[in-house]
Image (tube, grey):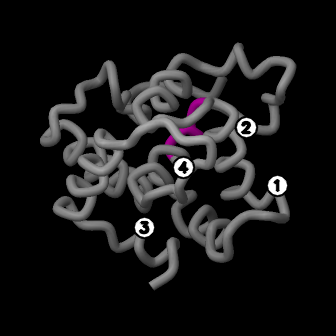
């Protein structure tokens, strides 16, 4: 099953397991592949920012939600922005299926239930708003 299929078919139990894996993650010189819960969070970030607006020179100005997620996911804000650029097809090196997943989950009626599932799983694993912000609640595009 490819990443697009794994992400779109994510269950609460799978999401909880992924959050436990993330909580146990240690910083490494080379990052591991993004898990479906991380991809859902990156897809949700499109509701509050345009990743093409950020690069090396202004990466420190990304929204707080990106910085919080980066810390929780044991990744850099630049890694999250890069993943978003892969998802929306801005970069040629995106994994196969990522831009397909981006197109599939563009509509709120597709993304919001998946986002809610991921947030519910995070809360069940003890990750509160301060660690995993609920991005889709009342935020507008920056």
What is the quadrant of residue 127 in the picture?
top left
Q: Earlier in the sequence, mark 3 or mark 2?
A: 3
The part of the image, by quadrant, that contains residue 120 is top left
Distance of label 3 from label 1 (alpha carbons): 20 Å
Relative to 47, does residue 100 appear above or below in the rendering? below
| Mark 3 crowdedness (10 Å alpha carbons): few <14, some 14-19, many ≥20 | many
- Disc 2 to disc 1, C-alpha distance: 9 Å
3D distance between C-alphas at marks 3 and 2: 21 Å
Classify 121 as above or below 94.
above
Residue 114's label in the rendered image is: none
Residue positioned 38% across, 51% down in the render: 112
Q: Which residue is mark 3?
A: 7
Is disc 2 surrounded by few (<14), some (14 to 19) or many (20+) residues within 10 Å? some
State the residue position of label 4: 43
Whichever of labels 2 and 4 marks the residue nearer the N terminus, that label is 4
- Distance from disc 2 to disc 4, alpha carbons, whole Å, reads 11 Å
* Residue named by callout 1: 90
Q: Earlier in the sequence, mark 2 or mark 1?
A: 2
Q: Position of residue 135 (x, y in %)?
A: 43, 32
The front one of 33 and 133 is 33
The numbered disc on residue 51 is 2
Where in the figure is residue 49, as x and y percent of width and height?
A: 65, 31
Residue for point 57% across, 68% down: 101
* Main secondary structure found in the magenta portion: loop
Q: Disc 4 and disc 3: Cα gap in Å?
A: 11 Å
SS at circle 1: loop
């Amino acid at each position: 099953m490819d990443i697009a299929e794994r992400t779109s078919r994510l269950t609460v139990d799978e999401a909880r397991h992924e959050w436990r894996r993330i909580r146990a993650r240690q910083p490494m010189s080379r990052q591991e592949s993004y898990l479906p819960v991380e991809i859902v969070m990156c897809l949700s970030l499109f509701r509050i920012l345009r990743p093409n607006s950020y690069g090396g020179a202004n990466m420190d100005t990304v929204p707080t939600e990106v910085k919080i997620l980066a810390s929780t996911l044991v990744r850099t804000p630049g890694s999250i922005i890069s993943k978003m650029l892969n998802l929306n097809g801005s970069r040629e090196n995106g994994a196969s299926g990522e831009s397909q997943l981006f197109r599939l989950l563009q509509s709120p009626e597709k993304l919001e239930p998946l986002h809610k599932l991921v947030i519910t799983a995070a809360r069940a694993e003890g990750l509160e708003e301060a660690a995993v912000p609920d991005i889709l609640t009342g935020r507008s595009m920056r």
